[in-house]
Image (cartoon, helix red, strand yellow):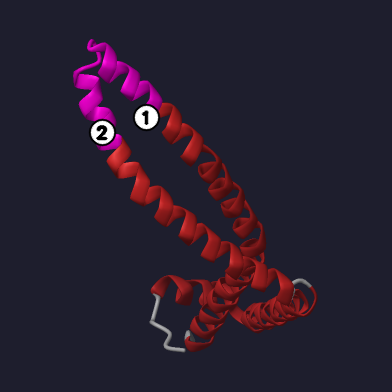
Amino acid sequence: MAVEFNPCLCSLAEMLGESKTLVINLINSLIGLLQTFKVTILLFSIDLEDEIRRLRYELELAAAQKVIDTVQAPFSMLMGYTRLLADCDPVATFAKTLKETRDDVLGDLEERVYEVEQLIAAITSKKKKLDAIDKRIEMLEELRDALEICG
C-alpha cells in the first residue's frame, strides 16, 4: 500500500515516542479483530439463498420499473393535456377515468416496487457491513504504515 508522507501523523508518532510500538501493535490487533469479525460474518451471516433472492428481487424490480417508466410518461403527458381542458365535461370525465386507471394499474405495482426495494435493502445490509469493515481495515493499515514510516 502506498503511504503518503503526512506531517500530522509524524507529529503524532513523535508525541507517542516509545509508545509508538504499542500503538502500532494495538492497530495490528484491531486489524486482526476486524478481519476475524468479517470472516465470522461471511461464514455465518451470508446465506446463499438470500443472495439468490436478492438477485431475483433485483430482476423483479428492474422489470417493474421498466413497466412503470413505459406507462408513466404517456399517462403524465395525457393528464397534462386534459388539465388544460378540465372545464370541458367529456375531457374531465376522460381525465378522471384515466387517473383512476393509472392508479389501479400502477398503484399495486408501485407498492410492490417499494416492498422489493425494502427486501433488497435488508439483504444487502450485510454487504454494507462488510464494506464498512473493509474501509476500517484499510484506514487502520494506512495509519499504521504512516506511523511506521515516521521516525
Task: Tell me which residue sits at (51%, 43%) in the image.
Answer: 110
Query: What kind of residue is marked 1?
Result: Leu
Vertical placement of 13 versus 120: above or below?
below
Task: Tell me which residue sits at (27%, 12%) in the image.
Answer: 89
Residue 119 image offset from top left, x and y in percent: 64, 55
Q: Is residue 93 magenta?
A: yes
Query: What kind of residue is marked 2?
Result: Leu
Q: Secondary structure at mark 1?
A: helix
Q: Main secondary structure of the magenta part?
A: helix
On screen, residue 3 versus residue 115, left or right, reads left
Alpha carbon separation for disc pair 2 and 1:
9 Å
Residue count near mark 2 (Cα–Cα under 10 Å), binned few <14, some 14–19, many ≥20: some
Residue 104 image offset from top left, x and y in percent: 50, 34
Residue indicated by mark 1: 98
Q: Quadrant of residue 128?
A: bottom right
Q: Quadrant of residue 141?
A: bottom right
Residue range in magenta is: 76-98
Residue indicated by mark 2: 78
Determine contact: label 2, label 1, CB under 8 Å. yes
Mark positioned earlier in the residue sequence (2 or 1): 2
